[in-house]
Amino acid sequence: MAADAPQSDPVQQEEPKQKRRRAVEACVSCRTRKSRCSGQRPTCSTCTELGVTCQYISTGNSHDIVVVGKEHFQAIENRLNQLESLLRENSSSPRGTKRSHSDVESTHRTVPTPNSTLSDGVTRASIGHQGSADGMGVLVFGDEEDRAYFGPSSNISFTSDISRTLKRLSRSRGNFTPGSRHTSLFDLHIARVSRPSSPVAHPTPWTANGSHLESTPTSIFYLPPDEETLSLIDQYFADTGMLFPYIHEETFRETYAQLKSNHTVTRRTWLGVLNIVLALATLSTVLPVGDGEKRRVEAEAFYHRANALCAEHVMNGASLEIVQYLLLVTQYMQGTRSSNQTWTTHGLAVKVALQLGLHSAETSKRLPPVEREMRKRTWFGCVVLDRNLSMTFGRPPSIPEHYSRLELPIYYDTFEERQRQIEARQRCRYSTDSFNATIRLSCVLSRTLDLIYDSNLGTEEKIPSYELITRILRLRQSLEEWTTPLPTHMTLIKAQECMTDIGKNPTIDRFRIILTMRYHNLRLLIHRAILMRLCELIDDCDDVDSSDTLVLQDIARSTVYISIESATEMIGIVRSLVEMQWAQRGLLGVWWCALYHTFDAALVIFTVFLLAKRSSFISLPAPHSTYSLKTTFFGCIQPLQHLDVGNPTISKCCRRLEKLGEVWNALEPNVEPSMAYTVPSHQITPPELDHAISDVPFLDFDFMPDGAFDVSDGFLAGGGF
């Protein structure tokens, strides 16, 4: 019977194997293990076998899911590659030659643009930058433009005053129109602040051997090797940290040592302070020729990490570390092309300091002595920087004079129990002496801004000349009284002594040189107001009976003498140190302060020359002559170029001085020293002057085609302190 049973056909017996369907959506567990998922719900077969929880993440019903073909993805990828190619071409083209909106839009209407990531792992959107694509398509942004006020004490105002004088001296004698017929004289102190278009190209970091890195550490908690970090910490406390000692060095080093040994929990704000210390030390380091750009890129990486660590705490918290962090960022920004951020960041530091009561002795009296001293020094750091920025930006100070009532800082070793080595204790005392001298000098600066420049309020009221002279004489006396209590190791130094007296103690040499530069810079600021009043009288000298003119004549000679003396000393000190070894060049402090001082002194020398050539009652005091002034003026350009090779801000300042030199040569051709005293003043303007003046870009500073004196330049925010 069994044999009679029909045999099944082997072909029919083998049913065709159906191709296993791929699950439209895999569960979370299968995705994590990268294993096949049956897609069964509520639990897939794999999760059932393993006994794990099966979960699905879906944005809609399964009926709404659409399976997209491979060709569609390939088309999207091709369009994305084409768009990336266009963006690379656009970013590599010179600034100002942007691709039109229609060219980019024709590629594709909607292109997803992921947030780019900074070296600290934080997306640009988190710090204020946004993508350039939305539902309307790809947008190509132009330069953002704001207006910024620069009052009478600023460098912008000084160059504007010189520009008006040169315009008046030209044979055309046309009305001064700063770049536009629609701009009035009332707008002369309102300059344009341009920001780069979006997206902004960021420089590629460098390796230690000078080659570019393809990628940077993505963690905001990244720190360089221990040896490099300690070297930068040493650099900071040997330079900026010694001039502005509001961070307690021993406590800072102990915290870092504990961090490296993994024996402590570190605050994000302290790690942010560490990164901005490293950024400031990197930016201010005196390195061999050609390392300026590398130093800037490395410093920027430290700054971005510090910003990512502290950005949220700055807006939502208040602590001594936050104030110190903001002060460090302010000082760092002075050496970058971020003048707006410099002013804004310092304003925030002052508000947080007031919130903490750093200005109040009553608030701090129950705190431990070290913390009490740190709070006091941090407050004075706010005060000194506030007056410095008020001077350089020409804006009203954020801290009134009567807010500064705390006693001056004292030596740490008078109340600390820790034992320091003799050299370290002496260096700490020198730092305190220098800081106290700077605080006292900033008080004279505050009175100068108030009495001479009306606190930079920009009012239309003009101080009468006799009253202006009275105030200047009082400030002269205050400035000389400032020098009286200086310790013997902090006395001012002369330019001729730089070649012979420095080198024995670099720490003391640095303090003496920087205090001397600050003293002469303030001296020039005081007397600059008289120089500008005298410039207003050029070509109006026939009216010698004018009481205003007669009053100014009485002080003109002493003003010219003091201006020449201070400007010549400042330029001489910079020349002497720059021409020496790299180690001696570091005695000038950070490069942006040395640039500010030298550039300002050169402008004063040029102004005195104009007065000597065009005013009938201005004569140069012996042994000075127009020839010696010309030698001093042209002699500062080359040292500036070597102050920090490859620095774009320094290069721009040197080009401006070279343009002024062309005006100088047009006014006075080269003469021999023996003929210098006989060159007649008040000459008729030579024909060459018209061409030279028309070729000076900063005459119309508000509309500068080549960006001369762009207010984002670091030297405008740098200043004398």
Image (cartoon, helix red, strand yellow):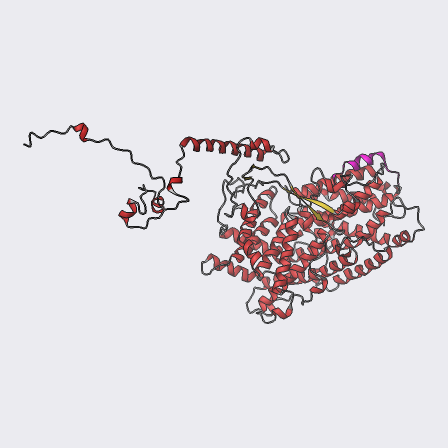
- Along the viewing direction, whichever of 563 and 581 lies nearer the viewer: 563
Q: Position of residue 167 (x, y in %)?
A: 82, 40
Q: If the image is split into quadrants, where does the C terminus sit?
A: bottom right
Q: Residue at x 78, y 62 (%)?
A: 478
Q: Is residue 248 visible?
A: no
Q: Residue at x 35, y 45 (%)?
A: 27
Q: If the image is split into quadrants, where does the N terminus sit?
A: top left
Check if residue 697 falls in the magenta segment.
Answer: yes
Q: Is 10 on the left-hand or right-hand side of 4?
A: right
Which stretch appears magenta? Answer: 683-698
Q: Residue at x 50, y 38 (%)?
A: 112
- Along the viewing direction, whichever of 32 and 433 lies nearer the viewer: 32
- Along the viewing direction, whichever of 468 and 101 lies nearer the viewer: 101
Q: Position of residue 560 (x, y in %)?
A: 83, 51
Report the magenta stretch's main SS.
helix
From the viewer's perspective, is residue 344 above or below residue 251?
above
Q: Residue furthest left?
A: 1
Q: Residue furthest right?
A: 545
Q: Is 440 on the left-hand or right-hand side of 312?
A: right
From the viewer's perspective, is residue 69 above or below residue 60?
above
Check if residue 630 falls in the magenta segment.
Answer: no
